[in-house]
Image (cartoon, helix red, strand yellow):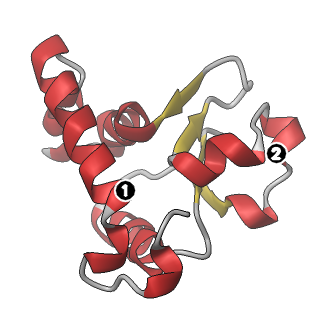
Amino acid sequence: MNTLVYDGDCAFCLRCVQWMQLHFKRVPLIVAWQQADLAQLGLTAEQCQTAVQWVSADSSQILSAHKAIARVCKDAGGLITVAGYAMSLPVVSQLAGLVYRWVARNRQRMPGGTTQCEIR
């Protein structure tokens, strides 16, 4: 099963994955990086501290940040799948990357965010 690795210390990130679990038809295994076997997934703590990570079932493919979100959306089923494919288009992907980085830098200010969400 594909795996989405997120920051379990971030309330905003937790709310996002809970929202996906409620609204997406299909979701990958979702695990906080603090509880994940990072070596088995082919990840480092540094990668996980800076962005959400998507790891294919056989660990042969790892996607980070907006590319990870796009992949989860592609696999979700329903209309959100269209958004996932759109986020993978070259120009849209660049914009999605900018938005992702802005949200990541400001996640403590997002709905549900706390001072613990701030990336240091």
Around disc 1, counting alpha carbons within 10 Å, would you say few (fewer than 14), some (14 to 19), or many (20 or more)?
many
Above or below residue 43? Residue 48 is below
Q: Is residue 1 above or below residue 86?
A: below
Closest to the camera, between mark 2 and mark 1, is 1
| Secondary structure beneath label 2 | helix
| Residue that numbered label 2 is attached to | 38
| CA distance separating discs 2 and 1 | 21 Å
Q: Does residue 81 appear in the picture of this structure?
A: no
Asked where in the image residue 86 lies, by quadrant, the reply is top left
- Left or right: where 7 falls relative to 96: right
| Residue occupying the far top of the picture | 90
Q: Is residue 4 above or below residue 13?
A: above
Q: Is residue 52 left or right of residue 29?
A: left
Quarter containing the N terminus:
top right
Q: Position of residue 20 (x, y in %)?
A: 35, 63
- Which is nearer the eye, 13 or 23? 13
Given contact means CB atoms under 8 Å apart, are the residues at marks 2 and 1 in contact?
Answer: no
Is residue 45 depicted above or below 119 in this figure? above
Is 70 situated left or right of 32 in this image? left
Residue at label 1? 104
**Which of the pair 46/15 is nearer the observer?**
46
- The residue type indicated by label 1 comes to Ala
Q: Residue at x 28, y 57 (%)?
A: 103
Quarter holding the C terminus is bottom right
Q: Residue at x 21, y 24 (%)?
A: 93
- Residue 74's disc is none
Amino acid on which the number 2 mark rests in the picture: Leu
Residue 2 % position (x, y): 61, 38
Query: Is residue 46 shown left or right of residue 90?
Result: right
Residue located at (27% from left, 78% from top) = 109
